[in-house]
Image: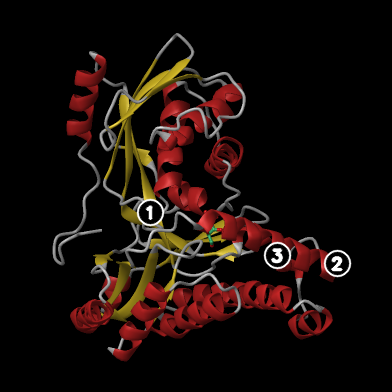
Amino acid sequence: MTAPRTAPPAGPDPAALAAAFTEAYAAPPEGVWHAPGRLNLIGEHTDYNDGLVLPFALPLGVSVAAARRDDGVLVVRSLQAAGDGVRTPVDGGPISAEDWPDGRRWAAYPAGVARVLRPSGTGGASLLIDADLPQGAGLSSSAALECATALALCELYGVQIARPELARLAQRAEHEHVGVPCGLMDQSASLLCTAGHALLLDCRSGLSAQVPFAPSGAGLALLAVDTRAGHELAGGEYARRRDECERAAAALGVDALRDVTDLAGALASLRDPVLRRRAQHVVTENHRVEAAAGLLRAGAVAELGALLTASHLSLRDQFEVSWPEADTAVEAALRAGGRGGRMIGGGFGGSVIVLTAAARADRVRDAITAAYAKRGWTAPAFLEADPAEGAHRVR
Ligand code: GLA
């Protein structure tokens, strides 16, 4: 996310990737597929509580050049990684952390997808991966890699799987082969989003709706701020939050926190203060998603700011997943006249989004950069994005 302030970011060049594939594998690819990363407008830590989310696709993402193989093997190389990549059978049990200990853990994502899709009729393939989405910035580079691979394999083998189902299969690959108990948001965003819209997704029913969202058309800017705090340590905390939410739901006698209809009553009946805070966040966050979708449908994009900030405060104080760089960025943005802002993703690192009048965007960026400099932190990186297209074939 070191994008210059003016030029819009571009996905990896499909022709260059195809040429690199031909060089690497001594034969041209059969096609090139692209899947975007996402920003989540609102609805954080709601997906695994059967709740609502409102993400949109970034113009940045992961591209995969691919060709079938008839030996039942997946060969994966990446332009971002040195070495020969990974060779692995598409038939096989769960991939383990020991399989590729030497910095090739990223290969578990495409390999996991190949194994999960195998029973549907896909087979071996040679893949070459390229990405213009920064890793570790909380923009779902993993889901983009899964979804680009999934789409490539399905189209190569003529396997037809509806996209909502494909998102669930990509999520399953991450659960079973990477060991991350993620929700459904990131894969759904990558596969289902459309340009000019945010995706209102009900993570229980799987039903979704495209909600118009074009901040630049309304004289606004949606800035993503890479806080430059990695979230490698977030795994354990993420699993703990999931567990706390499940315990809160069980104590309340509901299937998921999504089902809480009397929040005050629920809070009064939960004895554990930690579970009370978790429930309060999830239930109020679902309301904020509905309110945000209502504002977008009314064309009142600028009014979103207060909801974003309320979401941030809830994630900071009730769900306790924010981090100092995120809090500082949001506070600096608000002081500089930004309309609202919040951390996005799982927490403990990654990105923040800020909604501001376009005319104030420079002031907001400068204020965040200055707040960082005052604390001696690595300067943040900015990206300004309007919603882009979901995963598709590019060549
Ligand atoms: C991560 C997960 C998502 C979601 C968010 C929090 O990005 O991959 O499924 O749970 O955290 O909203």
User: Marks 2 and 3, Cα distance to the nearest angstrom?
Assistant: 12 Å
Q: Nearer the viewer, mark 2 or mark 3?
A: 3
Q: Which mark is residue 253?
A: 2
Q: Is residue 4 left or right of residue 264?
A: left
Q: Which residue is mark 3?
A: 245
Mark 1, residue position:
136
Q: In the rendering, which numbered label is found on residue 303?
A: none
Distance from Cα at disc 1 to Cα at disc 2: 37 Å
Is there any visible trace of residue 202 in the rendered image?
no
Mark 1 and mark 2 in contact? Answer it, CB < 8 Å. no
Lower sequence index among marks 2 and 3: 3
Towards the viewer: 25 or 34: 25
Amino acid type, mark 2: Gly
Q: Nearer the viewer, residue 139 or 192?
A: 139
| Up-down relation of residue 73 to residue 392 (above or below) | above
Query: How far from the left and from the top, in percent, is residue 127?
Result: 35, 25
Nearest to the observer: residue 192 or residue 360: 360
Q: Amino acid at mark 1?
A: Gly
Kind of residue sitting beneath label 3: Cys
**Location of residue 155 with respect to 60 vertically, above or below:** above
Return the disc, 1 or 2, that comes first in the chain's sequence.
Answer: 1
x and y, in percent, of residue 83 in the image? 28, 26
Query: CB under 8 Å between callouts 1 and 3?
Result: no
x and y, in percent, of residue 93 in the image: 62, 24
Residue at point 61% right, 49% down? 181
